[in-house]
């Protein structure tokens, strides 16, 4: 099967990653989550998922380090879909992993959203895309975004979605150091009072007028957890020559703009480098 191929009872779909073009943390909530306002953008760095009907539910993955337990977001999405729809069919799912983990690229959330969309399609679309978006938020804050059309202003925990028209794409270098970061650990280090009080609505309007202010309020917290990461960012700018370098989500990867040379960068010799562009989808079809 080629990517995005649909046989009678089988479907192969690409599962994108995302970057946050800006990410403002507004406050810490009483439920432990953080209220944020962020411009999310899907990118063409893809995992691939194969789905087919089967007698029992099975899940396999090309990456043996991916947990095959209750924390696995594909399995959570499968259970959620069956619970919400009452459908008793079973599915065989295989995940071919390319998006790095603990990178802030939303790979697992994208996999969960792709699973919800695929199972819905295989079952004849019993749910609307906006229902899938609502269901996805019950198992993770970033999942709803991946059920948007690829560019969205996200608020609340990240699950309140305002879909936006596609932005002009530019070439991104996604640089992933060998050390990953845990999202809860990074959020736990956020000092909300110390953040610069930008108005995210104004930042968004300026972005849409091609006057971007790339920033990520999670950067100081990530640098607190992993101080070498700050030096790595500085080297990407100074030695690598990129014009913009910003932590992706809660890290540890960065997206870089401009004509840079990551091989000139000091700090992590074994980083990975992926080229990516913005990607969007049309309602009713997948990426
Ligand atoms: O919702 P999700 O499971 O992806 O969140 C993982 C963790 O990241 C949460 O348990 C929480 O510690 C942190 N988080 C947060 N505020 C958000 C999103 C995530 O504090 N808006």
Image (cartoon, rainbow, N blue to C red):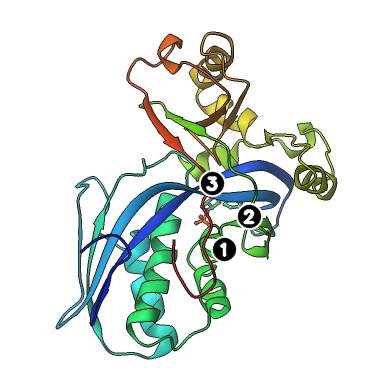
Marking on residue 278: 3
Name the image quarter holding residue 122. Answer: bottom left
Q: Nearer the viewer, residue 263 or 285?
A: 285
Asked if ligand 1 lies within 8 A of label 3, the reply is no
Determine the residue positioned at 74% across, 39% down: 192
| Residue 229 visible in the current orientation | yes
Residue 154 vs 251, above or below: the answer is below
Q: Quadrant of the C terminus?
A: bottom left
Q: Are marks 3 and 2 in contact (CB under 8 Å)?
A: yes
Residue 38 vs 228, above or below: the answer is below
Q: Are marks 2 and 1 in contact (CB under 8 Å)?
A: yes
Residue 253 vs 153, above or below: the answer is above
Residue beneath label 2, please?
A: 166
Binning the other alpha carbons within 10 Å of mark 1 as few (below 14), some (14 to 19) or many (20 upward) gives many
Binning the other alpha carbons within 10 Å of mark 3 as few (below 14), some (14 to 19) or many (20 upward) gives many
Tell me if 214 is positioned left or right of 119 in this view. Answer: right
Residue beneath label 1, please?
A: 149
Determine the residue positioned at 49% across, 17% down: 228
Tell me if 60 is positioned left or right of 170 in this view. Answer: left
SS assignment at label 3 = loop
Residue 102 vs 57, above or below: the answer is above
């Amino acid at each position: 099967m080629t990517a995005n191929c649909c046989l009678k009872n089988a479907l192969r779909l690409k599962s994108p990653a995302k970057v946050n073009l800006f990410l403002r943390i507004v406050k810490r909530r009483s439920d432990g989550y953080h209220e944020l306002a962020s411009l999310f953008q899907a990118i063409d760095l893809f995992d691939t998922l194969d789905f087919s009907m089967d007698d029992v539910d099975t899940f396999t993955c090309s990456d043996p380090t991916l947990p095959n337990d209750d924390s696995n977001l594909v399995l959570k999405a499968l259970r959620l879909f069956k619970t919400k729809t009452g459908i008793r069919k079973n599915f065989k799912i295989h995940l071919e992993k390319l998006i790095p983990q603990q990178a802030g690229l939303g790979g697992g959330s994208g996999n969960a959203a792709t699973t919800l969309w695929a199972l819905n399609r295989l079952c004849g679309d019993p749910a609307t895309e906006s229902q899938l978006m609502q269901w996805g938020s019950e198992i993770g804050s970033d999942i709803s975004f991946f059920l948007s059309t690829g560019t969205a202003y996200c608020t609340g925990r990240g699950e309140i979605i305002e879909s936006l028209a596609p932005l002009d794409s530019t070439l991104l270098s996604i640089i992933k150091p060998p050390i990953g970061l845990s999202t809860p650990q990074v959020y736990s280090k956020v000092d909300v009072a110390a953040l610069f009080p930008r108005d995210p609505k104004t930042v968004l309007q300026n972005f849409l007028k091609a006057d971007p202010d790339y920033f990520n309020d999670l950067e100081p917290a990530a640098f607190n957890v992993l101080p070498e990461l700050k030096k790595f960012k500085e080297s990407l700018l100074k030695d690598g020559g990129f014009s913009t370098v910003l932590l992706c989500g809660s890290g540890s990867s960065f997206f870089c703009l401009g004509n840079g040379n990551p091989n000139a960068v000091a700090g992590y010799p074994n980083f990975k480098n992926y080229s990516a562009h913005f990607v969007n989808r049309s309602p009713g079809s997948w990426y």
